[in-house]
Amino acid sequence: MITSAVPKDVACVLDSGFEGIEKTSKKTNIIKPENKPKKRELTAKQKAKNRRISKKRIFVENAFAGIKRFRITSDVIRSFRKNFKHLVFVLAAGLWNLHLFFDKRFNW
């Protein structure tokens, strides 16, 4: 379960694709946007809550988009080495962080 890897005192901010995770996860600190009910609209309060959640999630979404620019993270990796996929992802994340560092520091 994805939430088991997150410490208990840290909130999991998820998107609406994680429908029903509250029922299967033991973690109580889950923040997820409200889904639109069938044949009804969200209330103004629910829409405001969804906007607040989206503002928090956009940084993570942009980071994943940057990492996925390294195509190896999106392609199928056929390697028998243990933890190779994890290593590739960590290296791509490090390269993306380096790119952001130089971009902010030197205005590239």
Image (cartoon, rainbow, N blue to C red):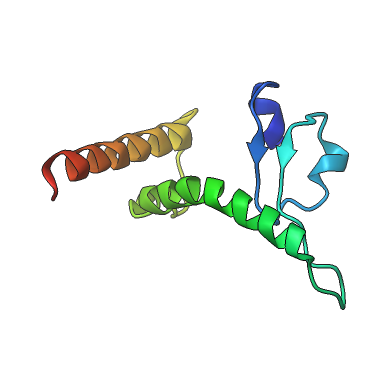
Q: Decide: is 45 above or below 21.
A: below
Q: Position of residue 102 (x, y in %)?
A: 17, 40
Q: Is residue 45 left or right of residue 61?
A: right
Q: Is residue 33 left or right of residue 100?
A: right
- Quick check: can you spot residue 77? no
Labels in figure, total: 0
Q: Is residue 39 left or right of residue 84?
A: right
Depth check, front residue: 103 or 83: 103
Q: Is residue 60 left or right of residue 39?
A: left
Q: Position of residue 32 (x, y in %)?
A: 71, 48
Q: Decide: is 28 above or below 41.
A: above
- Quick check: can you spot residue 82? yes
Residue at 49% x, 51% y is: 58
Q: Residue furthest bottom?
A: 39
Depth check, front residue: 72 or 50: 50
Quarter that holds the N terminus: top right
Q: Position of residue 28 (x, y in %)?
A: 80, 31
Residue at 87% x, 78% y is: 39
Kindly indicate the quadrant of the structure image that contains residue 89: top left
Kindly indicate the quadrant of the structure image that contains residue 22: top right
Residue at 80% x, 73% y is: 41
Q: Decide: is 104 above or below 41.
A: above
Residue at 87% x, 73% y is: 38
